Amino acid sequence: MKNFQENIVPAERQNEKPVWISENTGLRILFVGNSITRHGKKPEIGWDRECGMAASSADNDYVHLVLKKIMKYDKHPAWCIAQVADFERTFFEHDASYGYSLAAEFKPDIVIMFFGANVSRDYDTMENPPKTFFEAFEDMRNLLSNNGKAKVYISEGFYIRPVLDAEKKAVAEKYGDTFISMDDIRTREDSHGQFNHPGDLGMELIADRFFEAIEAEVKRLTEK
């Protein structure tokens, strides 16, 4: 039986750069994620698109689906993607500012944090790590939260990692952020596509879950 909870995509060299920023001038949305948020073309593994893996096109990944929903309230939302796969791999060695200053300078109104899959599974049983994922995640959250002005939404990952999810939830509770469950989505076989990443259905379900969480804040901000 196929293990749909196994992340089989190499964490290294997923993109040519870690941050992308649109030229739009509306509501400012920052997506902080890994290959599910954006993965550049990598023909050696059979991936020929530049979008969230494993959507069939950029229009069908969760980032673009969330932005499309936001357009009900703001026709030209500004967006930024911070792709943190390298940070996941190396958070023991690098602090959150390493490579992500442009994302911090974006000064978002809303931050969606959806990552963790590329943290080594050795961490889950490690005693006295040199740095905890809680600390690393907290540092990233604080770097990107626009000096505390942004509304932050912290999500469980697409793969079941109880230790990481618990530490992310603890960060959310510390700062009063919204914590989002993905358990009913990530355990569905039909939500998985190429490389065990979310296919179009999985991306749609993820986008729906995120927009359900942020819609009230989007409405509040756009009615000012």
Image: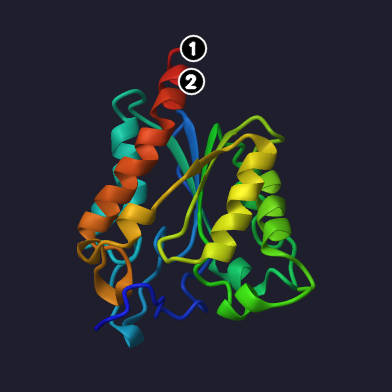
Q: How far across and how far down the image is residue 201, in percent?
A: 21, 56
- Cα–Cα gap, marks 2 and 1: 6 Å
Judging from the image, the colouring scheme is rainbow
Q: Is residue 219 above or below residue 214?
A: above
- Examine the rendering and report whether any part of residue 97 can be seen: no
- Closer to the camera, 123 or 81? 123
Q: Is residue 196 above or below residue 154?
A: below
Q: How far across and how far down the image is residue 172, in percent?
A: 61, 43
Q: How far across and how far down the image is residue 154, in percent?
A: 53, 46
Q: Is residue 107 above or below residue 52?
A: above
Q: Residue at x 46, y 42 (%)?
A: 79
Q: Amino acid at mark 2?
A: Leu
Residues at marks 2 and 1 touching, judged by CB atoms closer than 8 Å: yes
The crowding category of the residue bearing disc 2, from other C-alpha atoms within 10 Å (few below 14, some 14 to 19, many at least 20), is: some
Q: Is residue 111 left or right of residue 188?
A: right
Kindly identify which numbered label has been placed on residue 170: none
Q: Is residue 72 above or below residue 136?
A: above
- Closer to the camera, 69 or 118? 118
Quadrant assignment for the N terminus: bottom left
Q: Residue at x 47, y 70 (%)?
A: 15
Q: Residue at x 46, y 25 (%)?
A: 217
Q: How far across and how far down the image is residue 221, in percent?
A: 48, 20
Location of mark 2 (residue): 221
* SS state under label 2: helix
- Closer to the camera, 186 or 119? 186
Q: Residue at x 38, y 55 (%)?
A: 183
Kindly identify which numbered label has been placed on residue 224: 1
Q: Amino acid at mark 1?
A: Lys
- Examine the rendering and report whether any part of residue 175 can be seen: yes
The crowding category of the residue bearing disc 1, from other C-alpha atoms within 10 Å (few below 14, some 14 to 19, many at least 20), is: few
* SS state under label 1: loop
